Amino acid sequence: MKLARIFLDILFPPRGSERIVRELSYEELQAYQSPIYVQPNVVALLPYRTREVSALIQEAKFRDNQKAQKLLGNLLANYTWEEKLHESLIVPIPLSPERHRSRGYNQIERILTAGDIAYESNILVRTRNTAPQTSLGAQERRENLQNAFSVQGVLVPNKTYIVLDDVTTTGATLFSAMEALRSAGAHEVRAITLAH
């Protein structure tokens, strides 16, 4: 098996981020875990600027890398268990239908599934396709996401809703999603992001 991998790597050299993920262990990833509140009610688990974390996020998000999704899913599962959040309703940030069609999957849902974490994917919907946040400044990000989410159905008022996203910078995506949940009747809304 190892010989076959070497041969395939010679024929099809892996991307730099793929190689990093391939060599990364769960114990090494745990060493980077440093949950911090980046905004009120928004906790980030990992620093994105590290080479390993950025490789994991990129591979999980853009390459559908199952090992990256599994490592992130396990880290998230352990965090939610330790923080006694397993009774909360976890709501992944939805993609627009257009982006979901072009990518073929929602990386947050893949990470949750890989970590064996229950989630509610039908509560929050993206009402319109928005420009990618990475191409925008802070004010443009807020404007881009204004009224970008809505809630389907009736919420359980006494439950804690946790919005989950992969990376946060200004928090505009998370705050827009959290506001949609609050407007629909959720009393306690928090957010977790894998990296900041």
Image (cartoon, helix red, strand yellow):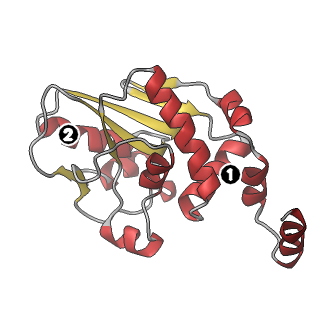
Q: Which quadrant of the figure has residue 6?
A: bottom right
Q: Position of residue 137 (x, y in %)?
A: 46, 50
Residue nearest the viewer, comparing 86 with 100: 86
In this orientation, does residue 38 appear?
A: no
Q: Earlier in the sequence, mark 2 or mark 1?
A: 1
Q: Which amino acid, by three-letter code, is at mark 2?
A: Leu
In this orientation, does residue 122 appear?
A: yes
Q: Position of residue 91 (x, y in %)?
A: 31, 43
Q: Which amino acid, by three-letter code, is at mark 1?
A: Ala
Q: Which quadrant of the figure has residue 119?
A: top left
Q: Which quadrant of the figure has residue 60?
A: bottom right
- Indicate the secondary structure of the residue bearing disc 2: helix
Residue 124 lies left or right of residue 49; in this view the side is: left
Residue nearest the viewer, comparing 26 with 52: 26
Q: Position of residue 75 (x, y in %)?
A: 56, 35
Label annotation for residue 181: 2
Extreme residue toward the bottom, this view: 11
Crowdedness near tag 2: few (<14), some (14–19) or many (≥20) residues, C-alpha within 10 Å? many
Which residue matches tag 1?
Answer: 55
Label 2 and label 1: CA atoms lie apart by 31 Å
What quarter of the picture does the C terminus occupy? top right
Residue at horizontal 28%, vertical 44%?
177
Residue at horizontal 20%, vertical 28%?
159
Q: Position of residue 85 (x, y in %)?
A: 37, 26
Rendered position, 40 above or below 19 = above
Residue at horizontal 83%, vertical 65%?
1
Rendered position, 151 above or below 49 = below
Rendered position, 58 above or below 129 = above
Extreme residue toward the front, this view: 1
